[in-house]
Amino acid sequence: MPQVDFFVLAGDDPSARRLYTCRLAEKAWKAGHKVFIRASDTTEAALLDELLWTFRQGSFVPHALAGNQGDDPLVPVLIGVSQAPEGFHDFLINLAADIPPDWRYFQRIAEIVDADPGVRQAGRDKYRSYQSQDIKPATHKIH
């Protein structure tokens, strides 16, 4: 079963949620993980694609939109809106309102929740869903 962590941000600014996603993806990539970022929709995926190039001065996170990476083994971070492609079940950062159907295949799952009422409610629902599958998610408050 995967390790599931909920990262709870204090504010409700969606750009802060995306920025934290970029920092987490960079940290996971530098630790040797292949990362799949599951965006809520194609607009958010495009925003994350752009932000991963610019979120921090001097940062470089090699990434691609799912389906655009071809067979390039050097792309360690993929962004998509559905299931992770083969080879990307190491670390999931889930920004979607639901749990992906392939969640059991991941080693680690990060759920990023902020104070937006819709995001917060989706986070609670996902937390309960994991618990119902005998997963004990850890919660980390980020200030």
Image (spheres, grey):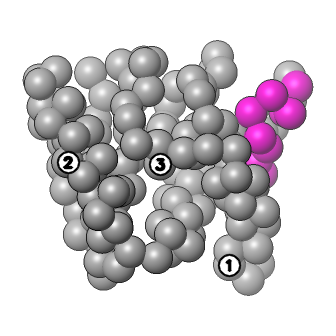
Q: In the visual, does 107 lie left or right of 32?
A: left
The span from disc 2 to disc 1 (Cα, nearest Å) is 30 Å
Q: Which residue is mark 3?
A: 95
Q: Which residue is mark 2?
A: 124
Secondary structure of the residue carrying tag 1 is loop
Q: In the visual, does 43 lie left or right of 29?
A: right
Residue 58 percent coordinates (x, y): 76, 78
Residue 65 magenta: yes
Q: Which residue is mark 1?
A: 56
The span from disc 3 to disc 2 (Cα, nearest Å) is 13 Å
Q: The N terminus is located in which quarter?
A: top left
Residue 5 percent coordinates (x, y): 28, 48
Closer to viewer: mark 3 or mark 1: 3
- Identify the residue at horizontal 44%, vertical 26% (top origin): 100
Residue 130 magenta: no
Q: Amino acid at mark 1?
A: Arg
* Prevalent SS, magenta region: loop
Mark 1: give few (<14), some (14-19) or many (20+) Cα within 10 Å: few
The region drawn magenta spans 62-70
Q: In the visual, does 91 lie left or right of 1?
A: right
Do the residues under discs 3 and 1 have CB atoms within 8 angstroms? no
